[in-house]
Image (cartoon, rainbow, N blue to C red):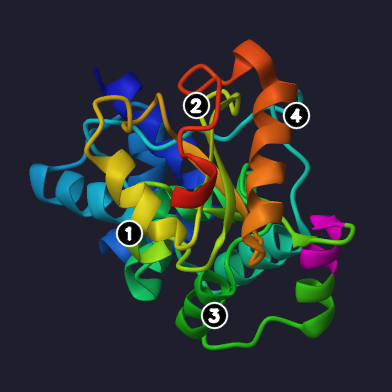
Amino acid sequence: MAGEIGQRIRRSRQREGLSQTALAEKVGVSQGAIAAWEGGRTVPTEENKRKLKVILGWSRVRAPSKPSEEETDEVSSFGVWLREQRVQNGLSVPELAKRASVSAPAIYNIESGKIQNPQPATRDRIAAALETAVPEQVVAETVESQEVAGLGPLTDFQPHDKKDWPTCAGVYVLYDISQRPIYVGKGEKISTRLKVHEEKFWFKSPVVEYASYIEVSNKELRHQLEQSLIRFLKSNAVINKKSTDDFGSD
């Protein structure tokens, strides 16, 4: 039991980019105590366990573990900058998430590369919580890497965080936990369409885990793009295999 707790503390601490000393300062114990916990020689008290849950983001559903090199997605310039700044400030992901009013999964996904280009509002909230500005070059590289010629950048958002729902017109794709596209949709206001999905039995994790959109103000072009994506995906779009809206009703 002590060994399992110790391994979990070590994995979580390393995932958050915290040294034993940094974690000790946050919990209010000595570095030696952290080392003893991780080595399985002692176990934290119930009070210290509660502190660890808050600092390291422990819950019944465990936070994503640090991916192996084979599993790691290409991380965007913003993702690299974010992790560097977070570690430099001695913050765990849950601590930064609370400060920024951004979900912890969103930050984990940005740092791991599963979210390549977060919405500007998300970037701004994170930067404000870190009390620094995102370098213009970092933003430019991040957006440019997701640019679709003639349309604009593909932007990621958290489908289960209403604050992150896009309010613009466009075409969006919902992905499952393995990042397989399962739904393609369009809307004059994407957040309105997502509100409808929210009431469906399938609009839950892990069936819907990630989402991306591209802003398209022209109604006819929205319809054409949605139709093209659905037909390209064929049976891979497991929820909708044809346009769910008539041309005139998005």
**Residue picked out by circle 1:** 162
Magenta stretch, residue numbers: 141-148
**Residue picked out by circle 3:** 124
Judged by depth in the image, the label closer to the viewer, 3 or 4, is 3
Task: Look at the numbered discs 2 and 4 and tell me whether their residues touch, using CB distance below 8 Å.
Answer: no
Counting from the top left corner in percent of width and height, residue 38 is at: 40, 34
Residue at coordinates 75% horizontally, 61% vertically from top-left? 153
Query: Under tag 2, what secondary structure?
Result: loop
How far is mark 2 from mark 4, CA to CA? 18 Å
Q: Residues within 10 Å of mark 4 (few under 14, many from 20)?
A: few
Type of the residue with mark 4:
Glu
Q: Residue furthest left?
A: 46
Residue 177, numbered circle: 2
Residue 5 visible in rendering: yes
Apparent side of residue 150 relative to residue 205 in the rendered image (left or right): right
Apparent side of residue 135 relative to residue 29 in the rendered image (left or right): right
Residue 69, numbered circle: 4
Ranked by sequence position, the earlier of labels 2 and 1 is 1
Q: Is residue 133 above or below residue 222?
A: below
Figure quadrant of the N terminus: top left
Counting from the top left corner in percent of width and height, residue 249 is at: 44, 50
Ranked by sequence position, the earlier of labels 2 and 3 is 3
Residue 30 visible in rendering: no
Query: Under tag 3, what secondary structure?
Result: helix
Who is closer to the viewer here, 89 or 247? 247
Q: Is residue 206 above or below residue 140?
A: above
Type of the residue with mark 3:
Asp
How far is mark 3 from mark 4, CA to CA? 29 Å
How far is mark 2 from mark 3, CA to CA? 26 Å
How far is mark 2 from mark 1, CA to CA? 19 Å
Query: Under tag 4, what secondary structure?
Result: loop
Q: Residues within 10 Å of mark 1 (few under 14, many from 20)?
A: few
